[in-house]
Image (cartoon, grey):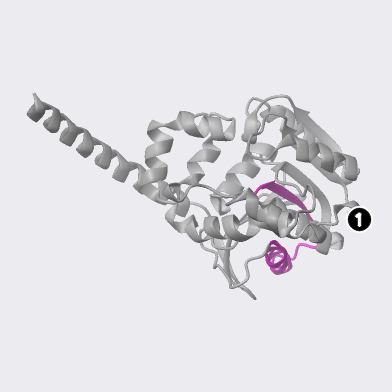
């Protein structure tokens, strides 16, 4: 009986390994299938995707992201209407991780690339961990910002001292998941774990496919964990959002377990902003795609 069990386990192992190699190969091909452009900036080579025509929307993508995640997200929330610029943030696919990968330096790179593309102004759409760089772009370069769109974005909530920041612990994914095989294995066979973490169904949203492959994103994920995700916690004074004078649109689901809605409520008290708030949908606001598109379209057309 034990031999049969061993044989079955070996067969199962071969099946899993075969499926992994097949799926990860597809993931790498998908990552390389975009019309990728590169640019040498003051902080090193950066990669981006520039597609469409019309009003420009630049996305500051979330953790486990890259130009592919940004492009997928923009296509989901704005469709074919606008010019969409998706830049891999520091350490993400095709983009170098500099010595000081702060959100403010990331905003400087956004400006460099807009200059290269001859774009005077853009809407900045910040999602999840990309919120810090989105805020810094809007705060530092208001003359280049037509509007700030916060989509399931992290937001500055309150000033914390050093002890309070340390007590929060690491703000990022378990190290086990920063690996091609383990990310593939858990999303494929234990998707319910991610459903709970994200408040969204990983099997029903193409955005989750862009988390693979992980290896080209590893440096960016670690930088987000150690620096980006901590910046609004450690340097609250750098996020003087009350002085933002550009138009702001906040889109969020109340049941988002990743970017807490209570922080968004506090933000809406502090700044004048339009808002599209949903009771359900989780981090990717599932089930409300049309409403999200309409909210962004109204916001952009109103500010033309």
Which is nearer the eye, 244 or 119? 244
Quarter of the image for residue 102 reads: bottom right
Q: Position of residue 49 (x, y in %)?
A: 59, 56
Compared with 253, 145 (above or below) is below
Q: Give the residue drawn at x 54%, y 62%.
A: 91
In magenta stretch: residue 119: yes
Q: Position of residue 82 (x, y in %)?
A: 72, 46
Which stretch did the figure color magenta? 103-129
Q: Secondary structure at mark 1?
A: helix
Q: Position of residue 95 (x, y in %)?
A: 55, 64
Q: Is residue 249 left or right of residue 212?
A: right
How many dots with numbers?
Answer: 1
Compared with 33, 2 (above or below) is above
Q: Give the residue drawn at x 62%, y 28%.
A: 286
Q: Give the residue drawn at x 72%, y 48%.
A: 125
Quarter of the image for residue 271 reads: top right
The residue that disc 1 covers is 243
Q: Is residue 167 left or right of residue 184?
A: right
Q: Is residue 286 left or right of residue 176?
A: right
Is residue 300 visible to the viewer in this orientation of the structure?
no
Q: Give the residue drawn at x 51%, y 58%.
A: 93
Q: Position of residue 115 (x, y in %)?
A: 73, 68
Near mark 1 (Cα within 10 A), the count class, few <14, some 14-19 or many ≥20, is few
Q: Is residue 287 left or right of residue 179?
A: right
Is residue 39 visible to the viewer in this orientation of the structure?
yes
In the picture, which quadrant includes the N terminus? top left
Residue at the extreme bottom: 42
Compared with 235, 208 (above or below) is above
């Amino acid at each position: 009986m034990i031999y049969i069990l061993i044989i079955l386990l070996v067969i199962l192992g071969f099946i899993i390994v075969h499926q992994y190699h097949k799926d990860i190969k597809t993931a790498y091909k998908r990552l390389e299938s975009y019309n990728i452009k590169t640019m040498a900036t003051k902080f090193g080579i950066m990669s981006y995707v520039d597609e469409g025509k019309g009003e420009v929307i630049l996305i500051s993508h979330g953790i486990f992201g890259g130009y592919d995640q940004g492009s997928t997200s923009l296509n989901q929330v704005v469709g074919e209407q606008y010019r969409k610029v998706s830049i891999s943030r520091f350490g993400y696919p095709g983009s170098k991780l500099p010595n000081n990968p702060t959100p403010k330096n990331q905003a400087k790179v956004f400006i460099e690339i807009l200059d290269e593309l001859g774009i005077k102004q853009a809407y900045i759409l910040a999602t999840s961990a990309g919120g810090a760089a989105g805020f810094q772009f809007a705060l530092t370069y208001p003359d280049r910002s037509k509007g700030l769109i916060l989509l399931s974005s992290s937001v500055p909530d309150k000033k914390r001292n050093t002890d309070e920041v340390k007590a929060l612990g690491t703000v990022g994914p378990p190290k086990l998941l920063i690996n091609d095989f383990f990310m593939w294995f858990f999303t494929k066979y234990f998707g319910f774990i991610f459903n709970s973490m994200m408040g969204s169904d990983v099997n029903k949203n193409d955005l989750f496919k862009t988390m693979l492959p992980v290896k080209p994103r590893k440096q960016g994920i670690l930088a987000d964990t150690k620096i980006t995700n901590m910046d609004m916690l450690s340097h609250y004074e750098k996020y003087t959002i009350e002085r933002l004078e550009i138009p702001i649109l906040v889109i969020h689901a109340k049941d988002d377990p990743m970017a807490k809605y209570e922080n968004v409520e506090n933000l809406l008290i502090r700044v004048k902003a339009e808002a599209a708030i949903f009771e359900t949908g989780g981090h990717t606001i599932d089930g409300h795609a049309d409403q999200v598109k309409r909210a962004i379209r109204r916001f952009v057309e109103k500010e033309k």
